Image: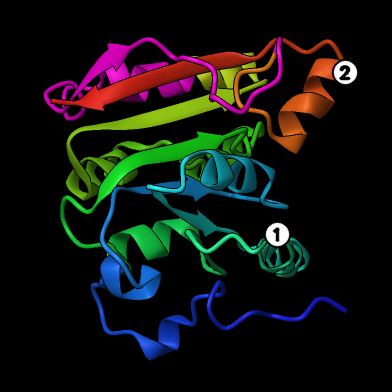
Amino acid sequence: MCRIDDTIAVDLDKYSRPIDLETIFGRPGPVHLELGSGKGTFLLNQARFNPQFNYLGIEWAHKYYRYSVDRMRRWQVDNVRIVRADGRVFIEQYLPDECLNAFHVYFPDPWPKKRHHKRRFFRPPIVAQLARCLVIGGEIRTATDHAEYFEVIKSVLLDDPDSTPWFEPVDFLPANTAAPGEWIGSNFERKYIQQARPIYTLALRKI
């Protein structure tokens, strides 16, 4: 069984709201947050490549949360922290204003059934929270294999009148740790590439 590392795993009960990110990392520095960090492949690779950055992973699935925490411990990565929480709740209740340099939201659940669309992550109220938490020049980077949801994401981020004043589109460059032919280098992306699914990407900068 994976052992939970008290340094890497963030116990939210120990912190007041909003949370002080410098306190949980034990140092200042730019912070990147990944929603749905899974087994931590993207976080691990990015944190090792960019030791000057701090990386925060949010994962609700308990088995993936435990796996990724233990993985960071085994690799002795000290610039990653992982929280087991509902991403929406964490963003709304724990993050202070202008505290992040980037949100990474890769392959979010498309909730394809119409009655479940209200559960999708990219909706105007959440986008307003993302804008609140990003510093000027901070980015939202997202990718999906679901064509219909990608059109929804573009509409919410680029066409919604409540979102357009905050963001401008920028080039989505591959992560510096992605392999040739990849955009992100995550487990999900590699699975979908093997299945020959198209990958749709979008990046925006807060203005």
Checking the image for residue 59, the label placed there is none
Residue at 70% in and 59% down? 75
- Which of 119/52 is in front? 52
Residue 190 placement, left or right of 169 = right
Magenta highlight on residue 169 = yes
Specify the quadrant of the image occupied by residue 154: top left
Q: Residues within 10 Å of mark 1 (few under 14, many from 20)?
A: few
For the residue marked with disc 1, what is the amino acid? Trp
Q: Residues within 10 Å of mark 2 (few under 14, many from 20)?
A: few
Residue under pointer 2: 194
Magenta: main secondary structure equals loop
Whole-percent x, y for residue 9 in the image: 56, 74
Whole-percent x, y for residue 84 in the image: 57, 69
Work out whether 51 lies above or below 166.
below
Callout 1: SS: helix
Residue at 59% in and 40% down? 115
Work out whether mark 2 precedes mark 1 in sequence or the reverse, and give the earlier one. Answer: 1
Magenta highlight on residue 64 = no
Checking the image for residue 75, the label placed there is 1
Residue at 31% in and 31% down? 139
Q: Which residues are magenta?
A: 152-181
Total marks shown come to 2
Specify the quadrant of the image occupied by residue 167: top left
Of tags 2 and 1, the one toward the viewer is 1
Work out whether 24 lies above or below 102.
below
In space, the residues marked 2 and 1 are separated at their CA atoms by 27 Å
